[in-house]
Every structure is written in structure tokens, then in C-alpha cells.
Image (spheres, rainbow, N blue to C red):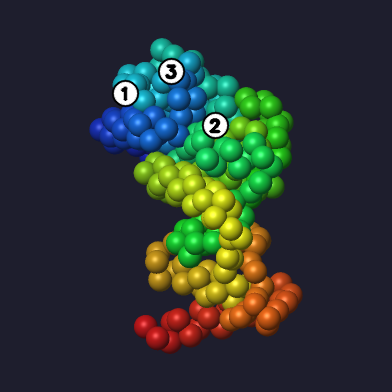
Amino acid sequence: MATDSTPEVSGRLEEQYRREMCVVGRWMYERGHIVACEGNLSIRLDANRILTTPTRMNKGMISPQDLVIMDMDGRHLQGDRKISSEAGMHLLFYRMRPDVQAVCHAHPPTATGFAAAGVGLDQALLPEVVVSLGKIPLVRYATPGTPDLSAVLEPYVPHYDALLLANHGAVTCGPDLQTAFFRMETLEHFAKIAFIAKLSGEPQLLTTREVAKLMAARARYHVSPPPGGGAELPETCDGGENETDEVTLTRSELDALVDEAVRKDRARR
């Protein structure tokens, strides 16, 4: 994707992005992540232009000509329709994360149910989720479509690729729109499994050591963590290999454990 020193995308590439956005909009609608006119998508075209879905349209039924282009200040540049009131949330990611090229906002029902209950998806339950998303924090409620929402999101954006929005929904980002959508899909799938685990009994969390090993393995799975660093790890059982062996680690001890796991992983290659 373009940066300050690179040219604008070609017309052909822009048309490709427009078609891709319509496809992802259909995926979100068909999978029930959105209904009616909910949700929005965006793609960074270059340093100054963002392609985004319009307001007051079903994102599962849009066509390439329905999309609009705005600048980094949220001003309308191109397109017959109006920009979503939630454009500011998308722009926050683009301003704070040069690595982010696409943003996906939706209201997946199970994950949004957790958000409405004030519960984050922040437990270490599934290895695949730990590797791909790490912790999924719950961001406190702020009125959608207002600067207040960007204000509560700002501390989290540099450190996480997926966030729950209290009483609202979820937002994910990625190096491309498909990745941002897959992260939304993973978030909702995880929420369904977490819900069933709670109904079935006491969810069995991974240990801190197990989580450290998974985080160290991210490079092997070609997963790049957010560049901000400082992300909190998911909640663990801190029970070691059996329930009677409790282990407590400081942050520096955990960092050292991750470094050791990385060295061992590289030595095995």
C-alpha cells in the first residue's frame, strides 16, 4: 500500500479494491455479522485517501459505484453517497498504525453479546486465537459516531488488532481487507466457543507458560504483532502443568521466558 513517499494507487487497483469491498460486505451480511445498514469497511488507497462504505446502505448489497472516498480528515472527496458517521474510528487506525491498510467494523451477535455484558474475550482458551489475535480487550462504551469513541479507542489501537466495543460491536484491522475480515470472523467464532465453554462448565484456561510459547511461535506462523508493543497477554490459569502447582510471573520474568522460547524455536529450525 502507498505511503507518503509512494504514488497513488492506479485506477485498475482502485477498481479491484472496490470489488473486494463489495465481496467482503456480502460475506459480513451472509454470516450475520451485520444486518440492515449496520457496519462499515474501509481500505487505505494512499497517504491521503481512504475508500469506505457509505452510510445508510446494506453492506451486503452495495456495488462498487456506491463506495465513497474521503481524506485523512474525513472530508468527502469522491462518490455520490455520504460518508458514515463512524469514519472517525477508521481514521484513528490509519493515523496511529502505518501498518494498517484496512478496517472492519461489525456487530457479530455472540461477540457483541459479550460486549453488552461487559465481558472481554480476553482469556487464553484457544491456541489459534492466542497466536492470531493475542488478547481481545473490551473498550468502555462511548457514543458511536462521535469523537468520544475515538478517545476511548486511542489507548488500545497501537497494541491490538481486534477490539470489543462495549454495548456496540467489534472492530478489527489488518494489512488488507481480507485479513481484517478474517480477524472479525475469528473473533466471532471464538466468542461462540467461549460461550459454549461457559455453559458447559468451567472454561479450562491455558497456563502462562503455554501462552508464552504460543506468542513466541507467532513468527513461525507468519503473524506480525501490532507494532505498538505493550499489549497485555490473555488471562491464564497460572497453574503450570497441574492444578496444584501455581506459578506467578512478573512482567520481566515473562519477557525473559518469551525470549528463551524464541531462541529455542529458532535453534530447532
Viewer-closest of 80 and 61: 61
Q: Is residue 204 above or below residue 36?
A: below
| Sequence order check, earlier mark of 2 and 3 | 3
Q: Of helix, strand and loop, which one carries label 3?
A: loop
- The picture quadrant where one finds residue 152 is top right
Of tags 1 and 2, the one toward the viewer is 1
| Picture coordinates of residue 69, whole percent (x, y) | 44, 25
Q: Of helix, strand and loop, which one carries label 2?
A: loop
Name the residue rendered at 63%, 40% in the picture. Answer: 115
> Which residue is identified by label 2?
72
Q: How busy is the neighbourhood of tag 2: few (under 14 within 10 Å), some, or many (20 plus)?
A: some
Could you tell me if residue 255 is visible in this image?
A: no
Name the residue rendered at 40%, 71% in the picture. Answer: 220
| Picture coordinates of residue 138, whole percent (x, y) | 65, 46
Viewer-closest of 53 and 207: 207
> Which residue is identified by label 1?
64
Locate residue 216 relative to residue 251 in the image: left or right.
left
| Picture coordinates of residue 208, whole percent (x, y) | 62, 73
Q: How busy is the neighbourhood of tag 1: few (under 14 within 10 Å), some, or many (20 plus)?
A: some
Q: Is residue 205 above or below residue 244?
A: above
Distance from disc 2 to disc 3, alpha carbons, whole Å, reads 22 Å
Distance from disc 1 to disc 2, alpha carbons, whole Å, reads 21 Å
Q: How busy is the neighbourhood of tag 3: few (under 14 within 10 Å), some, or many (20 plus)?
A: some
**In the rendered structure, which amino acid carries the disc numbered 3?**
Met
Q: Is residue 265 above or below residue 160?
A: below
Distance from disc 3 to disc 1, alpha carbons, whole Å, reads 13 Å
| Picture coordinates of residue 169, whole percent (x, y) | 57, 35
**In the rendered structure, which amino acid carries the disc numbered 1?**
Pro
Name the residue rendered at 57%, 51% in the picture. Answer: 199
> Which residue is identified by label 3?
57
Viewer-closest of 151 and 77: 151
